[in-house]
Image (cartoon, helix red, strand yellow):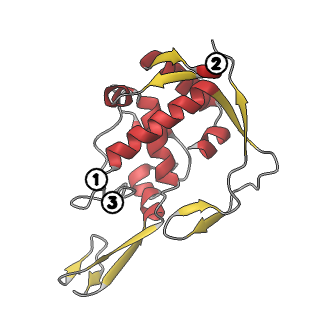
Amino acid sequence: MLYFLTQHPEWEDILLEEIREHCEVTPGTHSILIPTVSLDTCRNMTYMVSFFLETLRLLPPVYMDSKFVVNDCVLPSGGAVKGGSRCAYVIKTINCNPEYWGEDAEKFNPRRWINEQGKVRNDISDYQYPTFNAMPRLCLGKRMAELEVVTLMTFLILNFKLTLDPAFQKPPAFAVGITISFRDGLPLRITRRDPE
């Protein structure tokens, strides 16, 4: 999320406004502001959750996954798979499929996650967005991860302004292992935000 925040600074203001609207904030030591983020708060932070989901759509931490096929079957694409085979899939390829996400599937657009009522969409199939796997193997920690990231990002955005170090290589290079990471790290410049 930090990388996309530095690449789309217009979202910083949107997220900061949402934080101030939904979070109770208490002063901490050294002029640090401490936001209170509960599960209910998280559910009401449409832009923050949408930003989180869009980040993981474009940069899923787990690059690929595989399943073992128990019985012979035919995939939705029409391809036949023999029982006993291992079937691998690249999560980012599914997450950026224009058939599911539109012609701008490769572009960062958190608003694609917001429905007409201004809430986070709940009509997207886990099979269109397998970042957290899909039923019946949906990640048990999905909601907890969402709450943890929203809490951390709320604290960071409320207190600091983050910019990418100009020396950072663009586009970034990734190291692919079990999870994806920035090959050369993510060098950020962090400055204190003036409390308002």
Q: Earlier in the sequence, mark 2 or mark 1?
A: 2
Distance CA(mark 3)–CA(mark 1): 10 Å
**Secondary structure under the numbered disc 3 in the rendered image:** loop
Q: Is residue 38 left or right of residue 34?
A: left
Q: Is residue 111 visible?
A: no
Using the image, determine if residue 59 lies above or below residue 153.
Answer: below
Q: Amino acid at mark 1?
A: Leu
Residue, far top: 196
Question: Which dot marks residue 31?
Answer: 2
Using the image, determine if residue 85 lies above or below residue 34.
Answer: below
Q: Which residue is mark 1?
A: 140
Q: Give residue 44's position: percent from left, percent from top.
A: 36, 26
Q: Quadrant of residue 43?
A: top left
Q: Give residue 171's position: percent from left, percent from top.
A: 71, 56
Query: What residue is drawn where x is 54% and y is 30%?
Result: 155
Work out which quarter of the rendered image holds the N terminus and state it.
top right
How many C-alpha atoms fall within 10 Å of the one at disc 3: few (<14), some, or many (≥20)? Answer: some
